[in-house]
Every structure is written in structure tokens, then in C-alpha cells.
Image (spheres, rainbow, N blue to C red):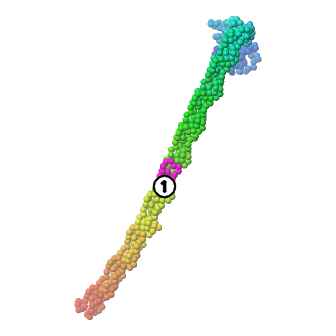
């Protein structure tokens, strides 16, 4: 804030700042000894610095030696701040360490321990010339040492000088000396040490003074004061070397000064001679030992996942690397597998009859019974459709159920035999058909139904056996699907009849389906077989027994005046019947009589004067009405 106030004050009083300029945050942050204040202090230290240009964008400082005052000649806008020496002096004086004395050209203003400014010599006089020295541009600051070439004998020679605190040059030697790297052999010249040797000291006499370069260093030519360390990638195996050798491929030196090369460790290589480091083998390759100039690709079936591998890892079961140089093994996709590690080709497709639904597997499960997989590399198994089955695991197709068997739903491991009473005529059935009326299957597993034989039938479909036709019914052949009633006049007295038999004469069946023939009752008869009814005995005849084929005529002395008579009546006294088969009796005529029953004549009686006399008048006369 002190600096900001000072700048604000100066801007108001002097009007030297660029019109409209405002101090922004980056510039305020730079108003330290490394910012605008530092520029002003630097400008104040030089007598010919008239102003300072502080660039607020890159915080750089420009000292204007030829600008006399103010801002004339400047074209900058808001990028820079310009201040003259007076304002810089005022700004710099805000610092507690400001030194405000005007010193000589080779002096500088410093503060004492009590913070009092004073001038001290900072460099030797710029116009001072050192005798016997070839002049060069060099630093003249106090305390700086220089080794300078001499302009006098011996050649080439040099002198060591430094700028002292009094501003004067001080010589180290009384006379010029031979350079380090050379020695004085007498006369006017300095002799250079040969290549491979060096001499780090000045003013040495005699060639025996040159020193062999140690192993790992060299001097490429004559006159070297110090040996040069072999740079990385090179080495010098012995002393007095004038050059360094390149490290062969497969080896390296990581830093200067090696007398031997190190082999690249396992997992690393160096392709080119002169390498200063080894390169890690890229993924998918390795070096099994040290000193390799190139990496070896991991063989098929192996991989290396990280750089710098000294060995390759075998692909686990379920994974493959079909070619050399893999950084990872390829996971066998679903439908494929590898049973062993080190798969070096490609994953094996699951054979038909098996499947694999997951990746990276070592085997393919067999399709369970009731399912199948038709193709290689199946991800799953298909269920056998109805009518088909697989009896065991591992089938590539389903088997048809044979005729007489079926599977009602998918995924069956065996076929079901059609139950008794049912059949399937074709293979691959998913249901059984019930045997129609008149047909049957006695056991399971039939592919066709059997016809009921003559005399038997099935009342509905789906029967496992035939039923015998009941009494009164018959079935003449298997062509019929049901039993028929025997017609009237016929009988089938037993179950399972194939034909009906005629009722014998004297017997009948009054309606169809009558099981057995019925005997004609007494008073009736049937003269012919196959009768559906009996005939009543006519008047004058009778039949006292059942099942008869004819009627008997009433004997003389007897009669029957009704049909279906079971027996004949005797003629009453006073009457008679002199013929067989009479339906009535005759009255005894006049002059005759009959006192007994069942007589075939009348007795003579001249005294009988009435018809139907039962007694002779000679006896008690009685009249019997006929």
C-alpha cells in the first residue's frame, strides 16, 4: 500500500505518467524488489539512465539511457509504464535499503552495517591496460580472476590476473608462464603435451612432467591441461587414451568417465553403439539376459504385459496369443476354449454337441440330455422339440421318437410309449392318437391299432381291449365297429357271438336283441325255426307242453272251443264227439242218450224222446243242455 500511495502521489504532482493509466492488480503485485521498484533502483544506479520502461505484461524492465526526461518519443499505450529518473529515485527511496549516493563510474553505492550509504569500488578502471597482455573483452568486477594470453615469450604463454578491491590489476606471476597442458623445454616456445596426456599446471619444465590420462578419460590432441571424461556411451579402457571407444550395441555408460561399458540388464537393450542408456523392451518382447542389442518377441503362446520384461509369461488356459509379440493374451470368446496353457494358435471351437456361454474357458460342457448343438462354437444348446429326444449328453442333433412313442414338450431325454388304447403311426410325434371305435392297443408303444375281432367291440375310442358282444348281440366280422342286435326269431345266448342262431321250431324271440329263444307256451306252437312269435293252437286242438312245433287234435269224446287251449274238455253227458279235433260236442239225438263224460257216441234208447238225453227213460229222465 505504501508503494501504491507513492505512485498515486507522483502521478498527481508531476503528471509524468501516461494519461488515463490505472494501476491494476498484476502491476500492484509486481511492486516489489523484483518489479517496478527494482527497475527504478537499477536505473538510479547508472548515471546515464534517464528513465525506466516497465512492461506490465511480462514484468520486464527497460533502461532508457538516451531519453532525457518525461515521455517524449514514447508511443506505448497501456502495455508499459514510463518514469523518469527523478520519479524512479523517489519510488526507490521508499525502500529501507535504498542507497542514494552518486558514485564514480567504477564504484557503487552500498549501505554500511548501520544502513549508511557509501561508495565502494566495484570494478577495475575500464580504461586501464595490463602490460604484456593481449587485450580482450572481459569482466572487470572486483575479485574476478582471468587467465590471459601474453604478448611476450615464451609462446604461447599466459599470465593470471585479478581485479583487486582498490581497483587495480594484480599479476600472479612475475613473468608469463607456459600454459597448463604445455611445458617449457628451453628456448622461446612452450611444448604441448601429446594426445593422451595432460598437464594441469602452469610453468612446468621438461616433457616428463606430462601426465597420462587415466582410464575413462582422454585428450584428443596435444596441449590439454585436463583430461576429458569419456562422454556417456563411450569408454576408455586404458590409460593414455587419445580417444574414447563407443560402447558396443547391447551395452552403455550412463555418465562420463567410464573405463568399461556395462551390459544392458535383462529386459533392456541398446540397438546402436555409443548408447548412454538402455531402452526397456516394449511390451510383447523381452531379453532373457544382459547385453542384448535387441529384444526378442515373446513366442506365440506367451506374452509380456509391461516394458522391461526379462521373461515372457505363458498364456493361461482359456487364452491364446497366435503370433509372436503379444502384450496380452486374447481371451477365448464364448463358444471357444483352450484346454491347456501356452495356446500358440487360436482358440478351439466347441465341437457340435457342446457349448460355452462364457469367454476365457478351458473346456466346453456337453449339451445335457434332451438338448443339442448342431454347429461348432455354439454359445448354448437348443432344446429338442416335441417328438424328439437325446438320450445322453453331447448330441449334435435330436433323435426322432419312433412310431408308437412321443414327447409332449421340449427337452426330453427319452420318448414316452403311447399308453394302451393309443398309438402314433409316424416317427417324431408329440402326442398319441386314441384308437377309434372298433380298434384297440393292448399294450404301450403301438404304432397302429388292432381291429376288434368278430364278436367283440369297443364302445368308444381309446380302449386297450375289446369287449365281447353281450348276449343278444353279434358282430359277424372285424369290419364292423359295433355289435348288432340279433333280429327277432334269432338268438345269441353267449357273449362274444359272431352270428345269431335261428330259434328252433317251438321257440321264438319276440324282439331284436333277445339273448335266448323262448319256448312257445302251452297252447301255442311254432312249426318253423326263426319265429318271432308263437301260434295259438286252433279250436279243436290243444298243446299242453311248451316249446312245441304243433298242436294235438282233441280226441273223440273231447273238444276245445277256444284257441290256445292247453287241453281239451270232455263232452258232457248227453253229448258226444265222434271225430278228432272237434271244437264242440254233438247232442245225442232222440232215442239215444249218454250218461257219461267224454264219450264218442250215444247209446240207443227208444224211450228217449229228447235230444241230449243223459239217461234212458227207463231210468230217471234228465235233460242236459249242451
Q: Residue 98: image x %, image y %?
A: 66, 10
Is 625 magenta? The answer is no
- State the quadrant of the C terminus: bottom left
Q: Which residues are magenta?
A: 388-416
Q: Which secondary structure, mark 1?
A: strand
Relative to 604, 348 lies left or right: right
Residue 180 in sight in this render: no
Vertical comparison of 528 with 286: above or below: below
Q: Residue at coordinates 48% horizontally, 61% vertically from top-left?
A: 448
**Which residue reaches farthest right?**
73
Direction from residue 448 to residue 88 in the image, left or right: right
Q: Position of residue 46 (x, y in %)?
A: 71, 11
Left/right placement of residue 55 relative to residue 395 reads right
For the N terminus, give its image quadrant.
Answer: top right
Q: Residue at x 56, y 39 (%)?
A: 343
Q: Where is mark 1, residue-wise?
A: 406
Amino acid at each position: 500500500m505504501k508503494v501504491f500511495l507513492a505512485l498515486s502521489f507522483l502521478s498527481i504532482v508531476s503528471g509524468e505518467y501516461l494519461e488515463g493509466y490505472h494501476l491494476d492488480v498484476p502491476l500492484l503485485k509486481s511492486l516489489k524488489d523484483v518489479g517496478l521498484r527494482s527497475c527504478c533502483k537499477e536505473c538510479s544506479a547508472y548515471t546515464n539512465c534517464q528513465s525506466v520502461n516497465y512492461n506490465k505484461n511480462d514484468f520486464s524492465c527497460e533502461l532508457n539511457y538516451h531519453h532525457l526526461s518525461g515521455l517524449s518519443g514514447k508511443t506505448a499505450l497501456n502495455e508499459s509504464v514510463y518514469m523518469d529518473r527523478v520519479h524512479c529515485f523517489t519510488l526507490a527511496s521508499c525502500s529501507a535499503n535504498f542507497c542514494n549516493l552518486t558514485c564514480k563510474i567504477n564504484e557503487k553505492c552500498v549501505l554500511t552495517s548501520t544502513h549508511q550509504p557509501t561508495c565502494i569500488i566495484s570494478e577495475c578502471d575500464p580504461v586501464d591496460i595490463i602490460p604484456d597482455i593481449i587485450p580482450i573483452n572481459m569482466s572487470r568486477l572486483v575479485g574476478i580472476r582471468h587467465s590471459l594470453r601474453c604478448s611476450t615469450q615464451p609462446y604461447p604463454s599466459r599470465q593470471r590476473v585479478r581485479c583487486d578491491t582498490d581497483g587495480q590489476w594484480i599479476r600472479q606471476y612475475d613473468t608469463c608462464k607456459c600454459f597448463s597442458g604445455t611445458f617449457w623445454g628451453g628456448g622461446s616456445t612452450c611444448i604441448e603435451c601429446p594426445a593422451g596426456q595432460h598437464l594441469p599446471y602452469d610453468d612446468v619444465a621438461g616433457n616428463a612432467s606430462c601426465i597420462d590420462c587415466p582410464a575413462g578419460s582422454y585428450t584428443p590432441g596435444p596441449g590439454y591441461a585436463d583430461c576429458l571424461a569419456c562422454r556417456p556411451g563411450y569408454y576408455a579402457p586404458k590409460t593414455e587414451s587419445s580417444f574414447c571407444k563407443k560402447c558396443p550395441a547391447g551395452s552403455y555408460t550412463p555418465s562420463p568417465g567410464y573405463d568399461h561399458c556395462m551390459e544392458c540388464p535383462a529386459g533392456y537393450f541398446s540397438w546402436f553403439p555409443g548408447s548412454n542408456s538402455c531402452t526397456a523392451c516394449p511390451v510383447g518382447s523381452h531379453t532373457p539376459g544382459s547385453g542384448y542389442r535387441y529384444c526378442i518377441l515373446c513366442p506365440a503362446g506367451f506374452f509380456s504385459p509391461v516394458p522391461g520384461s526379462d521373461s515372457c509369461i505363458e498364456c493361461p488356459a482359456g487364452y491364446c496369443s497366435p503370433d509372436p509379440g503379444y502384450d496380452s493374451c486374447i481371451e477365448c470368446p464364448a463358444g471357444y476354449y483352450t484346454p491347456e496353457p501356452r495356446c500358440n494358435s487360436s482358440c478351439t471351437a466347441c465341437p457340435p454337441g457342446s457349448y460355452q456361454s462364457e469367454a476365457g474357458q478351458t473346456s466346453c460342457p456337453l449339451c445335457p440330455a434332451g438338448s443339442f448343438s448342431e454347429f461348432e462354437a455354439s454359445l448354448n444348446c437348443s432344446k429338442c422339440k416335441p417328438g424328439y429326444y437325446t438320450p445322453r449328453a453331447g448330441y449334435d442333433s435330436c433323435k426322432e421318437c419312433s412310431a408308437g412313442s412321443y414327447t409332449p414338450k421340449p427337452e426330453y431325454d427319452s420318448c414316452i410309449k403311447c399308453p394302451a388304447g393309443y398309438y402314433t403311426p409316424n416317427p417324431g410325434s408329440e402326442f398319441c392318437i386314441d384308437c377309434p371305435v372298433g380298434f384297440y392297443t393292448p399294450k404301450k408303444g403301438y404304432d397302429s391299432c388292432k381291429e376288434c375281432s368278430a364278436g367283440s367291440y369297443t364302445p368308444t375310442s381309446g380302449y386297450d381291449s375289446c369287449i365281447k358282444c353281450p348276449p343278444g348281440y353279434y358282430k359277424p366280422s372285424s369290419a364292423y365297429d359295433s355289435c348288432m342286435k340279433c333280429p327277432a326269431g334269432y338268438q345269441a345266448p353267449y357273449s362274444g357271438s359272431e352270428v345269431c342262431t335261428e330259434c328252433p321250431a317251438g321257440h321264438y324271440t319276440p324282439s331284436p336283441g333277445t339273448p335266448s329263444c323262448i319256448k312257445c307256451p302251452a297252447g301255442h306252437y311254432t312249426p318253423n325255426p326263426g319265429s318271432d312269435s308263437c301260434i295259438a293252437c286252433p279250436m279243436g286242438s290243444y298243446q299242453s307242453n311248451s316249446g312245441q312245433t304243433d298242436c294235438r287234435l282233441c280226441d273223440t269224446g273231447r273238444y276245445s272251443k277256444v284257441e290256445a287251449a292247453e287241453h281239451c274238455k270232455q263232452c258232457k253227458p248227453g253229448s258226444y264227439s265222434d271225430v278228432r279235433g272237434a271244437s264242440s260236442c254233438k247232442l245225442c239225438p232222440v232215442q239215444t242218450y249218454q250218461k257219461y263224460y267224454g264219450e264218442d257216441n250215444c247209446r240207443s234208447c227208444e224211450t228217449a224222446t229228447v235230444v241230449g238225453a243223459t239217461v234212458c227213460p227207463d231210468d230217471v229222465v234228465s235233460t242236459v243242455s249242451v
